[in-house]
Image (spheres, grey):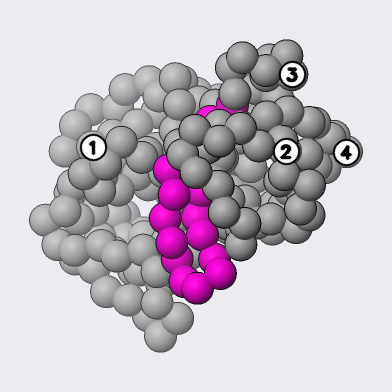
Amino acid sequence: MVPIESGCIVRIPDGTNRRILHAAKLLSFSENVYTAKLEESGIALTPDQEIFVYYEKVRNFFQQAALVKQATEDCDGVANFQFETTSDPMSAESRLCYRVTTVLDDLFAEVAGQPNRQILDVSATGLSFISNDKFDTGKIVDIKLSYEDFESRGALCIQSVSNISPGRTRYGANIATNNKSSSTLEKYLKKIYLSIQRQQLQRLAGVV
């Protein structure tokens, strides 16, 4: 059973290779059906949609497949939904390959010498950010990232480019493996990733 008091994180398959996790607040559980609410707006859910639910229990991280039963949006565009798990819990300790959204955590970085580039999501091996600069796929860009009391520098390789609006482009990037600072940056991204993920679960549980 997914523990109501801990909150959860939801992955919504979208037919691509992106595996982005979205924080959700568990509201209730009755007759094998959970009622929940996503923490961010603009994420669409539909009945009979398959999702994956991740949660922490006794200091271990688990995942379960689930099926959306009902879904609505409130006036702020935040999804309220009901789901039923369709598989047994299994370990998800390899979750470092997933990306967790950082929109609500106000995470910014200096990219290619330009400050205040918003970070949208982060994993142990890369991140995505918004910029008005133009980068081609395969371009290596420098990054300086600060989080809490730590700062790290390194290089990213642009993997994907998506135009959001005039002057705003979303870039997906992985750590540039042939850069001498890659190992340091990878350790730092892991730290950020796990810290944000734990903070989101604690926030959903009312701990912070």
Q: Residue at x 69, y 55 (%)?
A: 117
Under tag 2, what secondary structure?
A: strand
Q: Bin the neighbour count of mark 1 within 10 Å (Cα to Cα): few under 14, some 14-19, many 20 and up.
A: some
Q: Amino acid at mark 2?
A: Ile
The label shown at residue 149 is 4
Q: Residue at x 44, y 20 (%)?
A: 94
Residues under labels 2 and 1: Cα distance?
36 Å
Quadrant for the N terminus, please.
Answer: top left
Residues under labels 3 and 1: Cα distance?
37 Å
Quick one: 132 or 87, which is closer to the camera?
A: 132
Q: Residue furthest left?
A: 48
* The residue stretch that appears in magenta: 160-175
The label shown at residue 65 is 1
Tell me which numbered mark, 3 or 2, is placed earlier along the sequence. 2
Q: Amino acid at mark 1?
A: Ala
The label shown at residue 143 is 2
Check if residue 46 falls in the magenta segment.
no
Quick one: 56 or 145, which is closer to the camera?
A: 145
Q: Main secondary structure of the magenta part?
A: strand
Residues under labels 4 and 1: Cα distance?
37 Å
Residues under labels 3 and 4: Cα distance?
19 Å
